[in-house]
Amino acid sequence: MDWGWISANRGELISLAGNNLYLALIPVVLGLVISIPLGVLSVRWGWVYPPVLSATSVIYAIPSLALFIFLIPFTGIVTSTRDLTLIIPLTLYTLATLVPNVVDGLRSVPEPVRQSATAMGFGAMRRLARVELPIAVPVVMAGLRVATVASISLVSVGELIGNGGLGFLFTDGEQRDFPTEIYAGIGLIVILALAADALLVLLGWLLTPWRRSDPGASHSTREEAAA
């Protein structure tokens, strides 16, 4: 391990890490935006869920390199568009984790809680935003953590099309027979994943104040806190 090389190139390493984080988090955000309405539809109309789950599972089974190659004729690999070639597949991959967690989170809301919210005058959208989604946060957040860590790791595969964040260190280190680059890439990916996971844990803690004040609170208490 050449620590001198790491110190001399810390600026480039930070830049690669920032690019890796950007390419990883954009798909996660897009995946969450897509997964919430899909999850809501799957809970409201149960027949929607099996085909959605099958589609996301099939997409997740497709090798990332195959998706990159499929998208290149449409999105290209030039600087202005190549991010899309990586972001689109990673977004699709997040759906395999996020959609089931959104569905499970919404299904975890007890029916008496929904009925109580309706009796309090909540319409469907207000009940969803103020009661159901807040109660579903812990389950959704668990899926979000998995999707985020996986996305941070998968970005490196994009180096095969010239845009892989920290993946550059793997290919360059291999070509130059310089393992320090490879070790640095692995270490930075682990650090990014741990930091992102810790931030999501903190976010989940902030979004569920009733779990902090009273860990044994009943679902009805949570509904009142959300309302």
Image (cartoon, grey):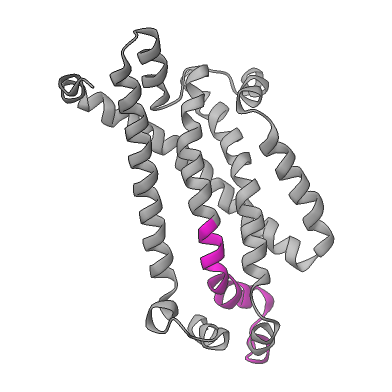
> In the rendered structure, does residue 118 fall within the stretch colored magenta?
yes
Nearest the viewer among 167 and 91 is 167
The location of residue 201, given as percent across then percent down, is 40, 60
The location of residue 142, given as percent across then percent down, is 52, 58
Seen at 40% across and 52% down, the residue is 197
Up-down relation of residue 77 to residue 115 (above or below): above
The location of residue 139, given as percent across then percent down, is 56, 64
Residue found at the far right of this picture: 47
Nearest the viewer among 179 and 40 is 179
Name which quarter of the figure residue 112 lies in.
Answer: bottom right
Q: Which residues are magenta?
A: 117-142
Would you say 85 lies left or right of 110 here? left
Seen at 54% across and 29% down, the residue is 86
Would you say 103 lies left or right of 78 here? right
In this view of the protein, can residue 81 be seen by the observer?
A: no
Up-down relation of residue 197 to residue 137 (above or below): above
Q: Main secondary structure of the magenta part?
A: helix
> In the rendered structure, does residue 26 fall within the stretch colored magenta?
no
Seen at 77% across and 46% down, the residue is 54
